[in-house]
Structure formats: C-alpha cells, structure tokens
Image (cartoon, rainbow, N blue to C red):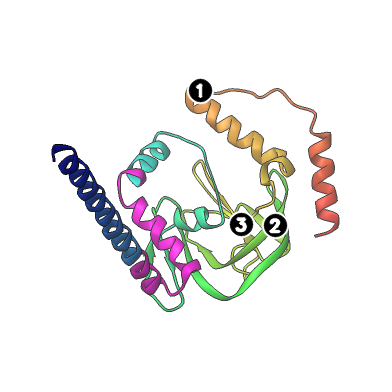
Amino acid sequence: IAAQYAVLTGVRDKLSEGHKAIREMREVRGQLDTLVARAGDGEAAKPLVVSKDLAGPNGDALRRSIAGGAAVLSVCGGYQLLGREYVPEAAPAIPGLGVLDVTTRAGKVRFVGNLLAEAERGTLIGFENHSGRTYLGPAAKPLATVLVGHGNNGEDRTEGALQGRIVGTYCHGSVLPKNPWLADLLLLWALERRHGPVTLAPLDDADELAAQRAAAEVA
C-alpha cells in the first residue's frame, strides 16, 4: 500500500507540474498576442519587445556604459531603438533608449538593396533591408551621404547617425570587414576608453578595400 501511495503521489506531483507549465505557457502566449495586437503584426511587434527590455535594468546598464565612454555600433533595428522612439503605422509610439537624437517612423515600402555612401573618413558600403524612416535631430549628425540606395529615409540622402561614440547605420552585409575605417574607429574608441589617447599602427587593408570596391561596383 505504501508503495502504491508513493507512486500515486508521484503521478499527482508530475500532473501538477505539467498543469503549471501549461498555464505559464498560456500566459506567455497571451502576453505575446497582446504585444502583436498592439504593434500590428509579428514584424512590428519586435521593437515593442525590445523597448520593454530597454525600459528595465538592461537599458540602465547600457546607458551607464555609454555615459562611461563605451563605443557602440548599432545596425538597423538596434539603430532605431537607440533613438527617441519608433512610430508604427497604426499603433502608439514605441519608446527607444533615447541615447541617439533620432526618430523612426514605419514606412509602407521596404528599402532593400545595396547601399553606397560617402563618409568623412571614407566610403561606406553595405546592404540595407528596412521599412523604417529615420530622421535625425540636432544632436546627431549623419554618418554618411547616400550615393546609391536609400539610407535613413530615402529623402534627405543621409545614412546613419553619429553622436558621441555611438554609430547607427542601416548597412548590413559585413559592415566592418567591408569598411575598415569604421572598424578602426570603433577599436580606437574602445582602446581610448581604457587606456587614454592611443595611435593605431596602420594595417594592410588591401583585401578589405578590394571587397569594398567589388561591392561598390554592383551597388
């Protein structure tokens, strides 16, 4: 009898654990459904999920790092949510971290294709794939001027943003290997944060620049 009781008790406990897991899964699914409903569709829900995370300890930690001089490279959605807000087509504005003076609004047409721009330090090449339209405020300056593609919004020929040691860009597609000057800049900032003023010894960027030229030719 004792053995049977132990078996039945074990089964009961397992069932209770299973029921608890099912309830938790349903609660999570309900929360996700609410996020999707607020943002409009699954793709648009992603900024809202990240925004909620940035409103907590992770956002506080990121702000502290940036205030302490950390170098930041943010691409596409990350770029958008370091800004003031992301405004969906048919939903309330989604707050960003607010460390970049930019605002992004959802667009009806997606920008997809090669992106070629000219920056102060050299050519910027990559691949853009976004429907957001990003507009810079007075505290941010453009990373580059668009030659081919759409960049921030397809209107003012700006691409990306620079503010302090934060870089925002819509350039996907191995942006650092194809743009060695940008990689060098981020490395320089990172080293200066730890060690003060430094001078980087020049490297042979022949392969990287060859890849950049090849990408520019098909842009």
Q: Which residues are magenta?
A: 32-58
Question: Amino acid under label 2?
Answer: Phe
Categorize mark 2 by other alpha carbons within 10 Å: few (<14), some (14-19), many (20+).
many
Please give the name of the residue rendered at 35% of the width and 64% of the height, measured from the top-left corner: 29
Query: What residue sits right under mark 1 in the picture?
Result: 196
Q: CA distance from mark 3 to mark 1?
A: 30 Å
| Residue at far top of view | 195
Query: What residue sits right under mark 3 in the picture?
Result: 170
Q: Which mark is residue 127?
A: 2
Q: CA distance from mark 2 to mark 3?
A: 8 Å
The numbered mark, 1 or 2, whose residue comes first in the sequence reads 2
- Residue 22 as seen in the image, left or right of residue 171: left
| Element marked by disc 1 | loop
Residue 57, position in %: x, y? 31, 44
Categorize mark 1 by other alpha carbons within 10 Å: few (<14), some (14-19), many (20+).
few
Residue 4 found in image quarter: top left
Q: Nearer the viewer, residue 164 or 148?
A: 148
Q: Quadrant of the C terminus?
A: bottom right
| Element marked by disc 3 | loop
Say if mark 3 contacts mark 1, CB within 8 Å: no
Looking at the image, residue 158 lies above or below residue 92: above
Question: Amino acid under label 3?
Answer: Tyr
- Residue 109 as seen in the image, left or right of residue 13: right
Please give the name of the residue rendered at 36% of the width and 46% of the height, measured from the top-left corner: 59
